[in-house]
Image: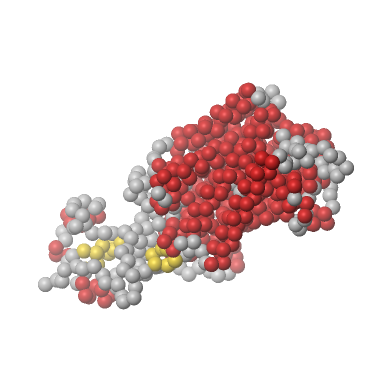
């Protein structure tokens, strides 16, 4: 008589682990003999049940579709395909790296948005090249924190909003949700204003209110082709399109940079810290650069973009079944396998670092260099306005009319691309906090319309001056919002409770939490962000700004 099925007993000294229904688990030969279990093999699936004589075709049909009583239903366990060893040649690694290009470009647009234009150009005109050091430091901090975002999303399979929903008390999650929504609205407002001003500059006959409305529809049209749970081919097409927008911004800035002349020695010296940027108005400018570079909404997007490639790897190697698009988000939670994490995380972080180095650092440094070369005058006490219209006139009058056109074009494409990312962030935050499933188009329309209403009110009632002041106010709000939004990322990635994944053999778990040096650096950077952002608001309250000299 066959022995009754029993729960496998873990070896001594190893914690008992229940295999996840979507995780691969191979029954050992010794276990088969002890339990008298017959293994029925289907394509890429192993069904563990009773003897064949006791399982007819109806039982198999019910088990395959999970019909019948829960106690009789067998759990499908997916047999992984043998994974071929990856080539270790430099060309093979380079080709694999190329396949990961895309998410970094999407994230990078948050660091070259219209807000950065104002801050970088006015800083260069006031301090010439001295603030290049703060541009470099700010972007290095951004790369480090964004790398932790990728790690969080890769290991857990969840974005930041979903992690907050899963791990935090409801009251605390709602507080973070309100802060995140406020920061996204402020960011989206800045993109709407920047895009509208660029359209108004390039097409003077186009009224500002009409330009604001137009900036909404072009973003929604682009986002119709994107879904983070869709086909990998569609996601790659979306990433290529955003990359093209980034390339346009990159090229226009290069053209504008070629129109100015400056001392290479002084430029490189600007990447070395100096006393002037840490006292009085220099400290305010340094804080403004740091607060304007790090964007809260980019952190949410950064935790979500790695999921598609992880899932593609697991599906390809039969480590999980393909997702059913009609499945509920309450019952369907994808958790990447350890193999997928090891294969993808290093390349994802390398791609992000490479893209932010070549795009974010270059574009922001180039804006400071252009401004410092063309507009800096140590003999004059006049301050360069950070109004975008004044900056356009300054480019046209001081450098050349073509430089003004390049400035407006780069501002336009910067606003479009940055608007896409902020709208994506709104979708991620809303979906994660409330676990709702409404039309992605309606969700994006709601997020975008919330931003356009204040922009239209300001454009109609105040005009050009009001729009530029609104962008400055948005930067202050983003600086404060960054503090509570960044904290959970460092907290989650530092604990094994959240960063442990089942081992490949299904026995025990592997902790991928931050090691001590990584955690220490992360908390030090967070403390630095807190000090600099709070200092920005305090200096504004004390009246120590560049406008007051």
What x and y, as percent, mark residue 321?
A: 36, 55
Please identify the quadrant where the C terminus is shown. top right
Can residue 316 be seen from the camera position used here? no
Picture layout, residue 257 above or below residue 29: above
Left or right for 501, reference 205: left
What x and y, as percent, mark residue 480?
A: 58, 45
Left or right for 31, reference 411: left
Name which residue lies at 45% across and 68% down.
84
Residue extending farthest front:
542
Please identify the quadrant where the N terminus is shown. bottom left
Q: Which quadrant would residue 218 be assigned to in this image?
A: top right
Q: Is 62 in front, or is 271?
A: 271
Name which residue lies at 33% across and 49% down.
331
| Total labels drawn | 0
Can residue 212 be seen from the camera position used here? yes
Give the color scheme: rainbow, by chain, secondary structure or one colour. secondary structure
Residue extending farthest left:
1
Left or right for 159, reference 140: left
Left or right for 332, reference 522: left
Name which residue lies at 34% across and 45% down.
328
What x and y, as percent, mark residue 212?
A: 60, 29
Q: Which quadrant would residue 375 be assigned to in this image?
A: top right
Picture layout, residue 532 above or below residue 341: above
Q: Which quadrant would residue 50 be assigned to in this image?
A: bottom left
Name which residue lies at 80% across and 47% down.
128
Picture layout, residue 447 above or below residue 67: above
What x and y, as percent, mark residue 428?
A: 47, 44
Q: Is 26 in front, or is 88?
A: 26
């Amino acid at each position: 008589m066959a022995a009754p099925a029993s729960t496998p007993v873990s070896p001594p000294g190893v914690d008992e682990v229940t295999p996840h229904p979507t995780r691969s688990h191979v029954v050992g030969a010794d276990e088969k003999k002890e339990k008298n279990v017959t293994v029925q093999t289907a394509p890429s699936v192993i069904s563990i049940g009773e003897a064949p004589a006791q399982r007819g075709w109806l039982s198999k049909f019910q088990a395959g579709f999970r019909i019948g009583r829960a106690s009789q239903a067998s759990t499908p366990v997916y047999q992984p395909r043998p994974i071929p060893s990856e080539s270790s040649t430099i060309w093979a690694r380079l080709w694999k790296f190329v396949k990961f290009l895309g998410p970094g470009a999407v994230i990078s647009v948050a660091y070259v948005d219209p807000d950065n234009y104002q801050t970088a150009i006015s800083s260069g005109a006031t301090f010439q090249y001295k603030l290049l050091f703060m541009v470099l430091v700010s972007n290095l901090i951004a790369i480090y924190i964004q790398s932790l975002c990728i790690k969080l999303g890769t290991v857990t399979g969840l974005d930041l909003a979903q992690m907050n929903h899963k791990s935090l008390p409801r009251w605390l999650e709602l507080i973070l949700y309100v802060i995140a929504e406020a920061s996204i609205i402020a960011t989206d407002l800045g993109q709407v204003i920047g895009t509208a001003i660029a359209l108004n500059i390039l097409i003077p006959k186009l009224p500002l209110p009409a330009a604001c409305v137009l900036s909404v529809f072009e973003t929604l049209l682009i986002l119709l082709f994107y879904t983070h749970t869709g086909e990998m081919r569609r996601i790659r097409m979306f990433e290529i399109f955003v990359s093209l927008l980034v390339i346009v911004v990159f090229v226009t800035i290069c053209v504008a940079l070629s129109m100015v002349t400056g001392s290479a020695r002084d430029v490189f010296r600007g990447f070395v810290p100096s006393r002037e940027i840490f006292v009085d108005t220099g400290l305010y400018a340094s804080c403004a650069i740091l607060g304007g570079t790090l964007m809260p909404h980019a952190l949410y997007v950064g935790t979500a973009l790695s999921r598609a490639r992880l899932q593609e790897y697991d599906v390809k190697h039969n480590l999980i079944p393909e997702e059913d698009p009609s499945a509920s988000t309450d019952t369907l939670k994808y958790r990447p396998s350890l193999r997928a994490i090891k294969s993808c995380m290093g390349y994802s972080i390398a791609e992000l670092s490479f893209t932010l180095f070549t795009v974010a650092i270059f574009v922001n440094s180039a804006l400071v260099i252009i401004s410092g070369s063309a507009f800096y005058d140590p003999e004059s006490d006049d301050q360069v306005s950070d109004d975008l219209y004044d900056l356009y006139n300054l480019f046209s009058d001081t450098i050349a009319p073509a430089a003004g056109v390049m400035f407006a074009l780069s501002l336009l494409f910067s606003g479009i691309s940055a608007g896409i990312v902020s709208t994506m962030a709104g979708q991620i935050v809303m979906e994660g906090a409330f676990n709702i499933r409404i039309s992605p188009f309606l969700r994006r329309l709601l997020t975008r319309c919330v931003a356009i209403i204040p922009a239209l009110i300001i454009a109609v009632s105040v005009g050009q001056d009001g729009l530029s002041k609104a962008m400055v106010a948005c930067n202050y709000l983003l600086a404060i919002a960054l503090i509570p939004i960044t904290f959970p990322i460092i907290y989650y990635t530092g604990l094994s409770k959240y960063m442990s994944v089942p081992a490949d053999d299904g026995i025990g778990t592997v902790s991928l939490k931050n090691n001590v040096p990584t955690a220490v650096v992360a908390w030090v950077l967070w403390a630095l962000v807190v000090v600099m952002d709070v200092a920005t608001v305090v200096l504004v309250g004390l009246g120590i700004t560049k406008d007051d000299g």
